[in-house]
Image (spheres, rainbow, N blue to C red):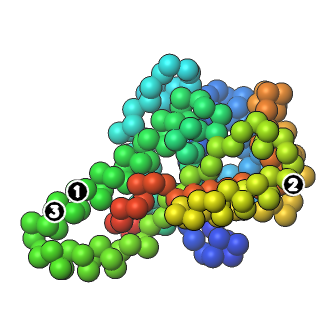
Amino acid sequence: MLKLTGDTLHKKAVLLVIAHPDDESMTDELYKACSMLKVPLKQVVVFDHPELQDGFGKVWNHTLIAKIVEDNIRSHGIDTVITFDSYGVSGHCNHRDVHIGISTYIICIHCFLVIYLSILHSASELMVLIDSQQNSFEAWELDSSSVLRKYSGPVDIWLSIFMAWCLPHRKSVCLLNEHPFKSFRAMAQHARQWVCSHPSPFSSTASTLPVLNLPCLSRGP
């Protein structure tokens, strides 16, 4: 988990939630990649939990993931979370579990608050409160793309813009990388992953999590 702050993020406190590394060597690779991207290592947290171990066919505890994310949101004042989409970029089951865990957290907080406030407040007061908190928390998912798009280089920029234009009902952003070769160098720190595949260093597309059509009122203190 990486907590990022800075002017480029409009002073937002961002929690980037990913799956893996699954062993000591991959943890070291993650630290090296973060150093390459100028992310302070004190803002990198690796959880080695017996219920969150790497492996196909191993279903992670979604409630545990939700709890870990909630604790970090509250302790660090996080107002934006970025993670995998439902496919998980590569289709890895653990990536999908991270998505489900965060979605579970958002839905549970929303449902609990709506039920609780429905008992104590009138419908009009409830809607006013929900509306006032609508923008208090954001969650974004990285759109998974095909192998063709991954290796299309700068062409993927136009494809991303076109896809966003074709789906106007989705709130999405296209992130253009001003330093693609720095991304290459950072990804190269993951030696074993680099052999298999690597993402486009030029652009990425992110969309709001579908569950965020419901207001989430879980912003940390």
Please identify the quadrant where the C terminus is shown: bottom left
Q: Height in image: 193 above or below 127?
A: above
| Residue 166 x, y percent position in the rendering | 63, 60
Q: Residue at x 76, y 36 (%)?
A: 147
The disc placed on residue 116 is: 3
Q: Residue at x 44, y 30 (%)?
A: 60
Q: Nearer the viewer, residue 137 or 160?
A: 160
CA gap, disc 3 to disc 2? 49 Å
CA gap, disc 2 to disc 1? 44 Å
Tell me where residue 159 sits by quadrant: bottom right
| Residue 70 x, y percent position in the rendering | 40, 53
Q: Secondary structure at mark 1?
A: helix
Are the residues tagged 1 and 3 within 8 Å (C-beta)?
yes
Q: Amino acid at mark 3?
A: Tyr
Q: Secondary structure at mark 2?
A: loop
The disc placed on residue 154 is: 2
Q: Height in image: 180 above or below 63?
A: below
Q: Amino acid at mark 1?
A: Phe
- The answer to whether residue 43 is left or right of residue 159 is left
**Residue that label 1 marks:** 112
- The answer to whether residue 181 is left or right of residue 60 is right
CA gap, disc 1 to disc 3? 6 Å
Crowd rating for badge 1 (residues with CA inside 10 Å; few <14, some 14–19, many 20+): few
